[in-house]
Amino acid sequence: MKVTALLVGRRGTLRVETGLTENVSSRGARVVSTSTWPLDDTILIAIPGFNFRSSARVAYCHSLGVGQFGIGLEFVGAAEHLEITALATSLQFLQT
């Protein structure tokens, strides 16, 4: 199943991006993104339609060509600081 995921990173500059999920399991997901993500970065992945939110570690980021990247994410559980940062970033993004 492919669903839209909201990705929020915290290493370096914060950004909010949507991507399509592929191969979702209880341990992780592969997401097709329009930008690269640093290896071992910790990001928040949220899938709004399924009321799902988790911290995830970027396990790999491969170019798929034409401005798309396949990102392997390993779910690592919720982290309070990351969720607060993500919420603040999302609110700033919506206000601009």
Image: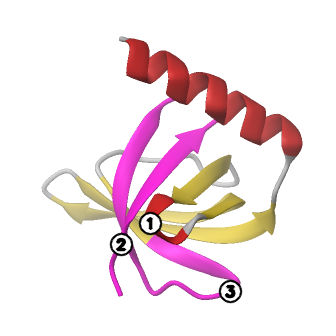
Q: Nearer the viewer, residue 53 or 72?
A: 53
83 left or right of 25 in image:
right
Type of amino acid at the residue the image marks with label 3: Ser
Number of marks in picture: 3
Type of amino acid at the residue the image marks with label 1: Gly
Circle 1 or circle 2, nearest the eye: 1
Let me know if residue 53 is in the magenta part: no
10 left or right of 16 in image:
right
Is label 1 in a helix, a strand or a loop?
A: helix
Q: Residue at x 70, y 83 (%)?
A: 27
Discs 1, 3 touching: Cβ within 8 Å = no
Image position, residue 65 (x, y; %): 18, 61
The image's colouring method is secondary structure
Is label 2 in a helix, a strand or a loop?
A: loop
Residue 49: quarter of image: bottom left
Residue receiving disc 1: 49
User: Label 1 vs label 2: CA separation?
Assistant: 8 Å
Discs 1, 2 touching: Cβ within 8 Å = yes
* Relative vertical location of residue 21 with respect to residue 68 in this rendering, above or below: below
Question: In the image, which disc is placed on residue 26?
Answer: 3
Residue receiving disc 2: 3
> Mark 1 packing: few (<14 Cα in 10 Å), some, or many (20+)?
few
Q: Nearer the viewer, residue 59 or 16?
A: 16
Let me know if residue 2 is in the magenta part: yes
Specify whether residue 12 is in view: no
The magenta span reads: 1-30
User: In what quadrant of the picture does the N terminus appear?
Assistant: bottom left
User: Label 1 vs label 3: CA separation?
Assistant: 17 Å
Image position, residue 10 (x, y; %): 66, 34
